Image (tube, helix red, strand yellow):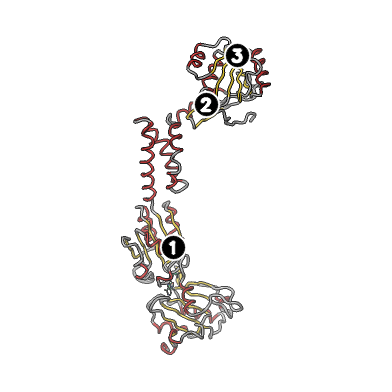
């Protein structure tokens, strides 16, 4: 690039042109689009130029350029169509401190004038460094055809409307609004009614886009915690407060569903482990279906949605449907349960890591690193572990775990009917089967309730013996 395109500030400043013929007129037609003061020096100016002078569009001086005439000019055009005269006036203008262009003389010019598509304040400048005027004309024609004639007016009025549009979320939504205005609603309004229609059009269009934005559904994937409403996060409460539709798991308690907005539609997508279940694909479809109707969907999951929550499938479904989503974390059963037995999930000099494992997965009983778990001091929180207790017990004993390792089962964590059963690995079964628990239960391997805890909180082992 031998010429660097810039937009020169010329408002209220001088542009001087020497010449009075066709070349001068061609340049003047461009220059007169600006708000600069234009002076023309010509002994014999064409009638058009004289007419522009009479209309006050430029100042005409009926003589050749003399030293000092280009003083304080930002730009100077030599358009005499006479090489010797152009060279003479260019030298003068140069000495006066102006940037000089000699028409049709690229080599001696300090700047060149591009082809222009004018939708002021939107201005497109096209340059080919003199190499291909045909290309410049074609590009100009294409761009002229692309940009609505009213674009300039629209841009000027649109500029005053920018802050109002900030009610739309940043990014795609705002861009869609502006593109609708500049290329659709705006030009139509100017064409059919005129400039006076632009502001009312902007206002109506903004309302339309605000409504469309509100209509675009959204999915909050919310953790409901273990059951006690006080263990909900504020974010979860606020989401429930705004929900149009709540799609919840079987384990979500009625007390928590109570907190949903009164008008919200509540849908039970409960998947009872072994009873009639709603397939995950059906749940994904349900979430998407309601969000696509423009609803604020709260997908309410027990505990924390990121723990054995099939969260990813639901996020993928939202993504595939182009629906915005957010995860609101919750207190997972293990966190609430360990609090209620007065223990820590990790403890210095005992266990520096803790495993969250599931008793069974889609393929049946879930396998784990039993050998590692069998080591002294290991702690695991076993989710969905009721049916698989005997399997887990057998595996751990087989891998050398101490039969006296404490095991604690907590049913209905944080609910009024919470039960704590303290046992050992060797007694895990048949204790658990005998307890005949009906509610959800989490099993801690390697943790016993803190000894100092109120004995009344813990059911004595004998009860199930
Ligand atoms: N996302 C949930 C876990 C879902 S898997 C969470 O973070 O807690 C379902 C298992 O979680 C149940 O089988 C049970 O093991 C455990 N669980 C969930 N809520 C429970 C509760 N209130 N009390 C005891 N266990 C619970």
The label number, if any, that marks residue 439 in the structure image: none
Quarter that holds the N terminus:
top right
Q: Is residue 370 left or right of residue 97?
A: left
Spatial CA distance of label 1 from label 2 is 56 Å
Q: Position of residue 205 (x, y in %)?
A: 37, 41
At mark 2, the secondary structure is loop
Q: CA distance from mark 3 to mark 1?
A: 75 Å
- According to the picture, the residue beneath numbered tag 1 turns out to be 235
Taking the spot 43% from the left edge, 44% from the top edge, the residue there is 165
Measuring from the top left, give residue 410's x and y in whole percent: 44, 79
Q: Looking at the image, is mark 3 or mark 1 earlier in the sequence?
A: 3
Whichever of callouts 1 and 2 sits on the residue coming sooner in the sequence is 2
Q: Quarter containing ligand 1?
A: bottom left
Residue extending farthest to the top is 44
Question: In the image, which disc is placed on residue 35?
Answer: 2
Is there any visible trace of residue 430 in the rendered image? no
Label 3 belongs to which residue?
80
Depicted 94 relative to depicted 402: above or below? above
């Amino acid at each position: 690039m031998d010429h660097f395109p810039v937009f020169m500030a010329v408002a209220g400043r001088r542009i001087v042109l020497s010449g009075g013929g066709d070349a001068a007129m061609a340049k003047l037609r461009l220059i007169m689009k600006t708000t600069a003061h234009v002076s023309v020096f010509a002994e014999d100016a064409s009638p058009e130029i004289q007419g522009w002078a009479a209309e006050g569009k430029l100042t005409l001086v009926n003589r050749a350029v003399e030293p000092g005439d280009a003083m304080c000019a930002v730009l100077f055009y030599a358009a005499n169509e006479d090489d010797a005269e152009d060279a003479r006036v260019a030298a003068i203008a140069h000495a006066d401190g102006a940037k000089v262009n000699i028409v049709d003389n690229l080599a001696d010019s300090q700047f060149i004038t591009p082809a222009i598509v004018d939708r002021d304040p939107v201005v497109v400048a096209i340059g080919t460094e003199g190499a291909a005027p045909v290309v410049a004309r074609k590009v100009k024609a294409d761009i002229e055809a692309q940009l609505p004639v009213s674009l300039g007016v629209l841009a000027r009025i649109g500029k005053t409307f920018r802050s109002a549009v900030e009610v739309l979320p940043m990014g795609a939504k705002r861009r869609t609004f502006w593109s609708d205005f500049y290329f659709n609603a705006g030009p139509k309004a100017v064409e059919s009614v005129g400039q006076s229609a632009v502001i009312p059009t902007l206002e109506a269009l903004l309302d339309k886009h605000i409504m469309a934005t509100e209509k675009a559904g959204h999915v909050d994937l919310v953790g409901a915690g273990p059951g006690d409403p006080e263990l909900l996060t504020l974010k979860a409460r606020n989401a429930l407060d705004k929900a149009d539709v709540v799609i919840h798991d079987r384990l979500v308690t009625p007390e928590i569903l109570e907190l949903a907005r009164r008008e919200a539609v509540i849908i039970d997508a409960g998947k009872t482990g072994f009873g009639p279940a709603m397939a995950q694909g059906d749940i994904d479809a349900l979430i998407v279906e309601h969000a696509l109707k423009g609803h604020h969907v709260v997908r309410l999951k027990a505990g924390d949605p990121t723990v054995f929550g099939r969260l990813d499938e639901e996020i993928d479904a939202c993504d595939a449907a182009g629906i915005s989503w957010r995860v609101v974390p919750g207190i997972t059963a293990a966190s609430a349960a360990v609090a209620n037995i007065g223990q820590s999930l990790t403890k210095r000099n005992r266990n520096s890591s803790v495993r969250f494992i599931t008793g069974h997965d889609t393929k049946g009983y879930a396998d784990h690193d039993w050998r590692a778990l069998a080591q002294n001091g290991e702690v695991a929180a076993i989710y969905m572990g009721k049916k698989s207790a005997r399997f887990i017990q057998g595996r751990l004993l087989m891998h050398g775990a101490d039969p006296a390792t404490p095991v604690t089962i907590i049913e209905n964590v944080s609910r009024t009917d919470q039960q704590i059963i303290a046992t050992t690995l060797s007694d895990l079964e048949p204790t658990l089967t005998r307890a005949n628990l009906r509610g959800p239960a989490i099993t801690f391997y390697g943790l016993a309730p803190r000894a100092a805890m109120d004995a009344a909180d813990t059911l004595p082992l004998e009860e199930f013996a």
